[in-house]
Amino acid sequence: MKQNKSRQFTIAVAPDGELSFIYDDALAALIEEGDATTSRASYVEPAMGGWTADLAPVNGPVLGPFHLRQEALDAEREWLDEHLFS
């Protein structure tokens, strides 16, 4: 059974109108509105002792290890929201 979870997204708008956000399929329509560039912010991968979120592509730390992959994904999004969009 699919659950309809309410999700929050952070979208930063620069003075020139450029949008920045963490990609989610729910926001795919924004990419179709103009020229878009997608770049990797991190690597969530299995590692010794669990899962890690390596934020090197945005000059960030390696987070983890986490027992579950979803925990690493959640930590990744939290770090990105705090450091890239605040």
Image (cartoon, helix red, strand yellow):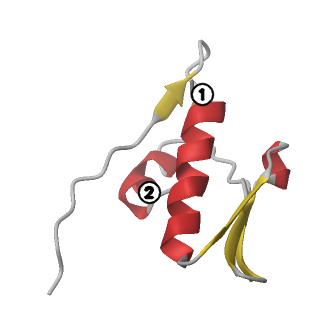
Which residue is rendered at x = 39% and y = 43% of the image? 9
**SS at badge 2:** helix
Measured from the top left, where is residue 71 in percent x and y?
51, 67
Compare marks 2 and 1 and give the one earlier in the sequence: 1
Q: Taking the image as drawn, is residue 22 in sight? A: no
* x then y, percent, for residue 46: 71, 82
Along the viewing direction, whichever of 52 and 12 lies nearer the viewer: 52
Disc 2 designates what residue? 28
Residue at 80% from the left image edge and 45% from the top image edge: 60
Question: Of the numbered discs in the image, which one, if any, rests on residue 18?
Answer: 1
User: Counting other residues with Cα less than 10 Å from the Cα at mark 2, is it few (<14), some (14-19), or many (20 or more)?
Assistant: few
Rendered location of residue 84, percent (x, y): 65, 33
**Residue at figure coordinates x 53%, y 46% from the top left:** 78
Given contact means CB atoms under 8 Å apart, are the residues at marks 2 and 1 in contact? no
Count of labels shown?
A: 2
Task: Kindly identify the amino acid type of the residue bearing the numbered disc 2.
Answer: Ala
- Residue 8, by quadrant, is top left
Q: Quadrant of residue 52?
A: bottom right
